[in-house]
Each structure stands twice: as structure tokens, then as C-alpha cells.
Image (cartoon, helix red, strand yellow):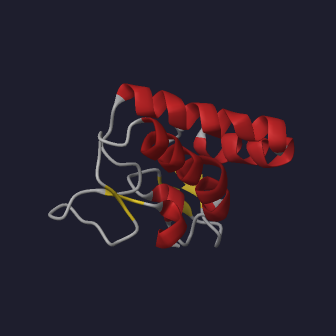
Amino acid sequence: MYLGNFTPDKYRKVLEFYHGIEDTNPSLYKTMVEQFGENIDNEHYTTTTGGQADLTMGFMVRSNNPQKLAWVRYVLCPTFDYYKENFPDAEVYTDKSVSVTTKGWRDPAYNY
């Protein structure tokens, strides 16, 4: 739902967009690396209320994630657009609701 079907190549593309934040907004990138790890590999992150939350599926768009909008703007939307443009037949790309049963990859611009 958040990133479509997992593939190693897609993970590398996500990391490319994530690391690209350093060029456009170095202070944001530094904060995000502290929170989520250089390769999105931290176990926990600090929530908007100061607590700790597990870095599990969907963490990028949780309401308690202080960098939620940054993930959507700099990582999720560009990844979705890249795959939709370059691999149009690889997945079901939609602006509609998706789930485990309906499958597909929902455009992050419509999720939030």
C-alpha cells in the first residue's frame, strides 16, 4: 500500500530519494538520519509526543511521525511517480483505497 510490492531495486530507489534530502534540505536530512537511520534501519524513532515507536511497516505515514510530510514529499511521492512512469505494468497504481485483498499501490498524494 505504501510502497507497492517490495523489491531490492525499489528499496535502493527509496534510499536514493531519502539520501537526496541531504542535497535539498541538509538540516532535515540530519534530523531524519538521527531518527530513522542512514539506511532506514533504526529500530525506533521519537514520536511527536516524545515517546518511542517501533520502526515498522507504515511508520513513514503515521500521525505520530514528526517527519510524516517529509517522507511523503521527498520519498513516497517521488518513488511512486518514478515507478508509475518507468514501470507502468509492474503494479496496479491507483488513487483509490487499497488493502491486502484489493492490492495495488495507492498514490501517496491521495493518502494524506
Left or right: where 48 falls relative to 112: right
Residue placed most toward the observer, 43 or 88: 88
* Residue name at image x 52 percent, y 41 percent: 82
In this orientation, which residue lies closer to the viewer: 109 or 43? 109
Residue at point 24%, 65% (across, down): 99
Q: Is residue 66 visible?
A: no
| Relative to 52, residue 56 above or below | above
- Does residue 75 appear to the left or right of 105 in the view shown? right
In depth, the one of 27 and 71 nearer the eye is 71
Q: Position of residue 61 (x, y in %)?
A: 51, 63
Q: Quadrant of residue 34?
A: top right
Q: Is residue 20 visible?
A: yes
- In the rendered view, does 88 fall on the left or right side of 51? left
Measured as percent of width and height from the top left, residue 87 is found at: 39, 37
- Name the residue: 47% across, 70% down: 111
Query: In the image, what residue occupies the spot 49% across and 71% down?
Result: 110
Specify the quadrant of the image occupied by residue 94.
bottom left
Above or below for 98 versus 92: below
Residue 83 placement (x, y as % from top left): 45, 41
The quadrant of the rendering that contains the N terminus is bottom left
Instruction: Please give left or right for residue 89 compared with residue 81 in the image.
Output: left
Q: How many marks?
A: 0
In this view of the protein, which residue sits in the foreground, 102 or 40?
Answer: 102
